[in-house]
Image (cartoon, rainbow, N blue to C red):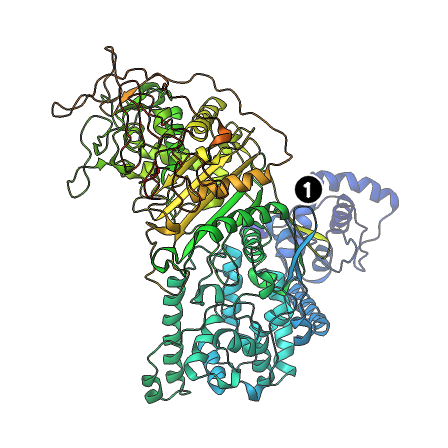
């Protein structure tokens, strides 16, 4: 017999029965009586137990013996039954997990019964939830979806400005009234299986859910039925809960409604842009006709809008996305329009011969404006709407706003808006006469914005004469270059970063640079050869040198930066920009509050420093406000709070930041204050109140600016000529020579006059505050070829041998001719003033007031310039003109010479 089958020796006094009882006692279970067991007395039982215990050694050994007997070997008779009974019986459980009677990993391995039971239970629960969800959801109610409330806009004082939105622009029409071509176009573009599917595209829903879960594109493959449900019943939120509800509502709609009803409902409730919901409203909005009269080509275009009107409306939607320009939208619309027509041919719903006849894109009509949004109201509403859509964090869309129900509380001050409009109207009515001078006075536009320096709140704007006639908001970006109003950013960069060491590399740390003082001397000659910081002559890609000109080709000679700003000399600031680095100039402008976007010009060329960029009036006012607050930058904003159904859905959060140190900002302000008091900005002086600002005129006289501020209020005014026909893709800015009867328009003409009138009214009754006293900053640097009177290191190179070396500057004493009292003179561009002394006056003829003596002024070095063409004079160092009224030159034949061009004032 093999070893493993050999029987173990039997203990004496009981045999097998005693062994069984010993094993049962060791595991805590009762003995199972056996008919064949030999009866024993209690005393025998007690005496046998120790022997059995010793036989098995321990409970573990007895348990293992019981398991071997009950699980591994199948004996016969009583032995088999006894072995199978080993182990505790326990209580019977409904879910046997962890599993009873199993050890090790088998204890945690579920049985097939448990797995199958759980699967059946889970499926049953899902079916229950689905059944309840299906029963609870409601099918779309088009009439309910069509209801909309007003959007109410409020002034800053809480008074209502205007209510817009009223009711959705929509009219329901029957299935039969919808052109067959429109139905076919929508099926071809949106859902080719519409007439045969059950309203659900499983692949499309799976793709949409996956994209949302992974952060991908939210647009999926929804069917027409699903889109109908979404547009008429649900919000536009791209969430899993919305998809869940959409699924069950779609099943219910597909099961209960006829396909024709679904198609009619979808086309009647869909949004086509421009405030039009439904095919009938879209037909009237885009083509001014009834839906039943739409052509095949027009239907194909309207079908493109269902993919996203903001990106397929040829009129553009830059207020929603800067990339949605009219050109980009037109291109996208044409491509999709052609594709839809071709798809209809493939579907067999459009004959190929008829398709070949459709070659011209059906360009829709320009957008119309609501009459109650006339004057400035439309510009203000659009500005606030645009700001809210761009800054809310709840994904509120343009369509949501079209449905209404919002309360938009703005920053606009009604009184200041009217004051700014009145100031513009005064100049326009007095000077701009398109009927008399059609070649020079047509397409004249003004723009303006006024900002609270302490908060960045936009208090007033001027967008144009009428928002229902002139659609572009001139307070926003128009493309008009800002000219010399850019120069303060050059000066701020020179103070912030310093000029570079000519012996160092292009990228230098602040320790290698020299911080510039406003008293630094630069060459102000006309046609100055511009050099790189290291002394090399700058050349463009065609190897051409850059010769910088000044307004009127005037040579200012060696001039300090304070007076260069005062007289708006170009060449010193162009060279200063090269010494600092035009990239640093750009950084300073952005820090002040401008955006590094499409309005920012090429910053790699010298002209960048004299204002070839074209930020908006709002941005310029906000950037200058940074100087007014000693370098604290407050982003501009137009909306304080938005509510819907009493709940706040948006609230403006202040985000101030330090752009410049007070040392830098206060020095810039001091220089700009001098511009208003003594320089090209004198027409903007505010009696009894501190003001700082800068004039700006661009090359070719295509735009003129004045931007200035008091400690409390910063305002920017622009003027330009531009055809307001936005459909004209070739329109360009036009020159303003002769506009308003003036020989040339500068920033200190009409823009400064408007600024003065508005600020006088806006600041009336306000506390008179002074600007902080500036502390000394930087070192006196000699640049652009200006020669230092004593040997000292210069961060800019000396002129080449071929360059003329101007004599060192001499102090310029005050002129011996006394100035008349202010009561006997007229300010330039004071339309109501008459000059009794015969000096030219900017009244009817618009000329500059040169004072009683004709504006002749002599500096100490004899630099008088009293020519017949204008008497503007700059002494060797003083660089100021001191005519009878301190004006800037004499007027000859009403021409009016104003200092500045190419960015001058």
Observer-nearest of 187 and 898: 898
Q: Can you say whether 118 is above or below 302 in the image?
A: above
**Residue 443 point in image, percent of width and height:** 40, 58
Observer-nearest of 549 and 396: 549
Q: Left or right: 171 with respect to 882?
A: right
Which quadrant is home to the C terminus?
Answer: top left
Q: Can you say whether 353 is above or below 240 in the image?
A: below
Q: Can you say whether 833 is above or below 324 in the image?
A: above
**Residue 633 point in image, percent of width and height:** 51, 34
Residue 239 occupies quadrant: bottom right
Furthest-left residue in this view: 802
Q: Residues within 10 Å of mark 1 (few under 14, many from 20)?
A: few
Q: Can you say whether 484 is above or below 662 in the image?
A: below
Residue at image point 64% right, 56% down: 71
Q: How many marks?
A: 1
Residue at image point 54% right, 85% down: 178
Q: Is any part of residue 196 visible from this angle?
A: no
In the rendered image, which residue does mark 1 sit on? Answer: 60
**Residue 255 point in image, percent of width and height:** 63, 82
**Residue 155 point in image, percent of width and height:** 65, 49
Q: Is any part of residue 174 visible from this angle?
A: yes
Furthest-top residue in this view: 790
* Secondary structure state at the residue bearing disc 1: helix
Observer-nearest of 171 and 851: 851
Q: Left or right: 487 with respect to 257?
A: left
């Amino acid at each position: 017999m093999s070893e493993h089958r050999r029987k173990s020796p039997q203990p004496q006094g009981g045999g097998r029965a005693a062994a069984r009882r010993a094993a049962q006692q060791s595991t805590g279970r009762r003995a199972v009586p056996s008919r064949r067991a030999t009866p024993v007395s209690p005393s025998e039982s007690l005496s046998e137990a120790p022997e059995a215990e010793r036989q098995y050694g321990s409970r573990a050994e007895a348990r293992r013996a019981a398991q071997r007997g009950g699980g591994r070997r199948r004996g016969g008779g009583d032995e088999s039954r006894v072995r199978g009974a080993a182990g505790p019986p326990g209580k019977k459980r409904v879910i046997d997990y962890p599993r009873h009677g199993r050890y090790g990993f088998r204890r945690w391995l579920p049985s097939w019964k448990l797995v199958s039971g759980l699967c059946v239970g889970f499926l049953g629960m899902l079916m229950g939830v689905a059944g309840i969800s299906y029963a609870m959801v409601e099918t779309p109610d088009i009439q309910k979806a069509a209801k909309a409330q007003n959007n109410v806009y409020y002034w800053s004082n809480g008074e209502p400005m205007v209510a817009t939105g009223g009711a959705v622009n929509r009219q329901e029409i029957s299935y039969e009234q919808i052109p067959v071509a429109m139905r076919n176009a929508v099926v071809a573009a949106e859902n080719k299986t519409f007439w045969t599917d059950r309203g659900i595209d499983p692949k499309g829903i799976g793709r949409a859910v996956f994209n949302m879960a992974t952060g991908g594109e939210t647009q999926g493959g929804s069917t027409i039925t699903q889109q109908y449900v979404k547009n008429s019943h649900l919000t536009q939120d791209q969430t899993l809960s919305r998809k869940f509800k959409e699924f069950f509502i779609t099943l219910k709609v597909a099961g209960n409604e006829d396909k024709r009803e679904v198609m009619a409902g979808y086309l009647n409730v869909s949004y086509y842009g421009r405030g039009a919901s439904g095919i009938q409203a879209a037909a009237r909005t885009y083509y001014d006709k009834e839906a039943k009269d739409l052509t095949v080509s027009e239907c194909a275009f309207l079908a493109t809008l269902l993919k996203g009107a903001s990106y397929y409306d040829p009129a553009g939607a830059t207020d929603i996305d800067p990339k949605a320009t009219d050109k980009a939208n037109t291109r996208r619309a044409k491509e999709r329009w052609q594709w839809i027509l071709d798809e209809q041919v493939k579907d067999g719903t459009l004959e190929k011969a008829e398709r070949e006849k459709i070659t011209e894109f059906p360009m829709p009509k320009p957008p119309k404006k609501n009459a109650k949004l006339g004057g400035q109201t439309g510009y203000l509403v659009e500005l606030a709407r645009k700001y809210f859509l761009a800054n809310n964090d709840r994904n509120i869309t343009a369509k949501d706003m079209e449905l209404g129900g919002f309360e938009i509380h703005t920053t606009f001050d009604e009184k200041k808006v009217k004051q700014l409009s009145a100031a513009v109207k005064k100049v326009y009515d007095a000077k701009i006469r398109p009927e008399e001078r059609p070649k020079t006075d047509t397409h004249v536009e003004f723009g303006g914005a006024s900002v609270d320096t302490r908060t960045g709140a936009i208090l007033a704007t001027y967008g144009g004469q009428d928002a229902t006639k002139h659609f572009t908001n001139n307070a926003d970006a128009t493309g008009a270059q800002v000219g010399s109003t850019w120069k303060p950013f050059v000066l701020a960069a020179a103070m912030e970063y310093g000029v570079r060491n000519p012996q160092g590399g292009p990228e230098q740390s602040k320790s290698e640079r020299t911080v510039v003082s406003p008293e630094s001397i630069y060459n102000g000659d006309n046609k100055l050869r511009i050099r790189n910081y290291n002394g090399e002559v700058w050349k463009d890609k065609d190897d051409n040198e850059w010769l910088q000109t000044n307004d009127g080709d005037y040579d200012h000679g060696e001039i300090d930066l304070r007076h260069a700003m005062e007289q708006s000399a170009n060449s010193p600031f162009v060279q200063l920009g090269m010494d600092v680095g035009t990239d640093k100039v750009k950084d300073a402008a952005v820090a002040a509050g401008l955006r590094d976007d499409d309005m920012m010009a090429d910053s790699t060329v010298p002209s960048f420093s004299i204002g070839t960029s074209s930020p908006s009036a709002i941005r310029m006012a906000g950037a200058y406000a940074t100087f007014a607050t000693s370098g604290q930058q407050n982003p501009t904003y137009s909306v304080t709070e938005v509510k819907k159904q009493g709940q706040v859905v948006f609230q403006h959060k202040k985000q101030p930041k330090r752009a410049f140190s007070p040392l830098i900002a206060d020095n810039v302000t001091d220089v700009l204050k001098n511009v208003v008091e003594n320089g090209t900005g004198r027409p903007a002086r505010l009696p009894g109140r501190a003001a700082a600002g800068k004039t700006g005129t661009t090359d070719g006289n295509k735009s003129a600016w004045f931007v200035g501020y008091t400690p409390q209020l910063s305002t920017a005014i622009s003027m330009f000529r531009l055809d307001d026909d936005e459909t004209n893709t070739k329109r360009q800015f036009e020159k303003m020579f002769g506009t308003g009867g003036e020989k040339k328009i500068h920033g200190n003409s009409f823009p400064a006059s408007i600024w003065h009138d508005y600020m006088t009214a806006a600041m009336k009754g306000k506390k008179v505050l002074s600007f902080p006293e500036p502390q000394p900053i930087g070192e006196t640097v000699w640049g652009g070829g200006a020669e230092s009177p004593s040997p000292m290191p210069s961060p800019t190179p000396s002129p080449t041998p071929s360059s003329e070396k101007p004599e060192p500057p001499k102090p310029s004493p005050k002129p011996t001719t006394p100035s008349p009292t202010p009561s006997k003179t007229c300010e330039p561009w004071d339309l109501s003033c008459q000059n009794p002394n015969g000096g030219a006056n900017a009244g009817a003829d618009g000329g500059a007031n040169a004072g009683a003596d004709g504006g002749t002024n002599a500096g100490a070095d004899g630099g008088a310039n009293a020519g017949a063409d204008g008497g503007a004079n700059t002494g060797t160092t003083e660089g100021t003109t001191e005519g009878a009224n301190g004006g800037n030159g004499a007027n000859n034949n009403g021409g009016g010479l104003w200092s500045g061009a190419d960015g001058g004032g």
